[in-house]
Amino acid sequence: MTDLKRLVIETARRMNALGINVNKSGNISARASLDGLDGFFITPTGIDYDALEVEDIVFIALDQSVRSQIPNKRLPSSEWLMHERVYCQRADVKAIVHTHSVYATALACQELGIPAFHYMVAAAGGDRIDCAPYALFGSEELADKASDALRQRNACLLSHHGVLACGKDLSGALKLAHEVENLAHMYTLTRMLGEPKILSSEQMSNVLERFQTYGQQR
Ligand SMILES: [Zn+2]
């Protein structure tokens, strides 16, 4: 468990080192079980990533009735509800990365998702990356809207807020958050050159099909 907590800390630091987040605006979590309880580790609120120690990482149980019995040293990120809702909804998700990366957030502030202007949009698992409707940070309403947007996708934008990306491990979730920022940057530039040309649903189905076997061929 200490190793996984360490990985959570490393991922938070890498997120900032990659330039897809500044200060403590984002947060990181990884599914875990502790003393037989299913839940997840998450970065705490109010502590610089550089100063984080293993004991600062917070464990949240998915079972609400036992939550208050867990002796955490710190309070979780104010956005822990959003993570909890996704873990409850998607058994396949093992890690979640939340950032306020610049280009993706700029699109989210215009309430724009990312359509299939580039085939790599399929990296999030579908033919577009949606922008979830606005709700107050840390609220149940945001948790509902964000988890809704991740029902059939591994990443979404959050209106007037940022990005949420998930994966089967911390490295995968971080890579996807980075890819979303890269796509948002390219999409912003593409829009500046005129009305973006969008790939057809048939073209995107072909990409999605190819992605299922990509990297596994001999
Ligand atoms: Zn946030």
Image (tube, rainbow, N blue to C red):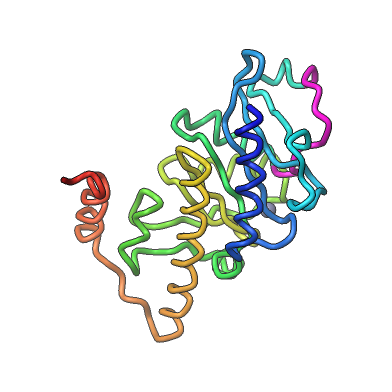
Q: Quadrant of residue 127?
A: bottom left
Rendered location of residue 103, percent (x, y) = 56, 70
Rendered location of residue 41, percent (x, y) = 66, 33
**Quick check: 94 left or right of 4?**
left
Q: Quadrant of the C terminus?
A: top left
Question: Which residue is located at x 45 percent, y 80 percent?
Answer: 189
**Among all residues in the image, which is located at the extreme bottom?**
193
The segment highlighted magenta reads 68-79
**Among all residues in the image, which is located at the extreme left?**
218
Question: Which residue is located at x 48 percent, y 35 percent?
Answer: 93
**Quick check: 5 left or right of 47?**
left
Q: Is residue 192 above or below residue 89?
A: below
Report if residue 149 is visible in the image.
no
Q: Quadrant of the N terminus?
A: top right
Q: Toward the viewer: 98 or 48?
A: 48
Please check the rendered image and state whether residue 61 is part of the magenta-colored stretch, yes or no: no
**Magenta span: helix, strand or loop, mainly?**
loop
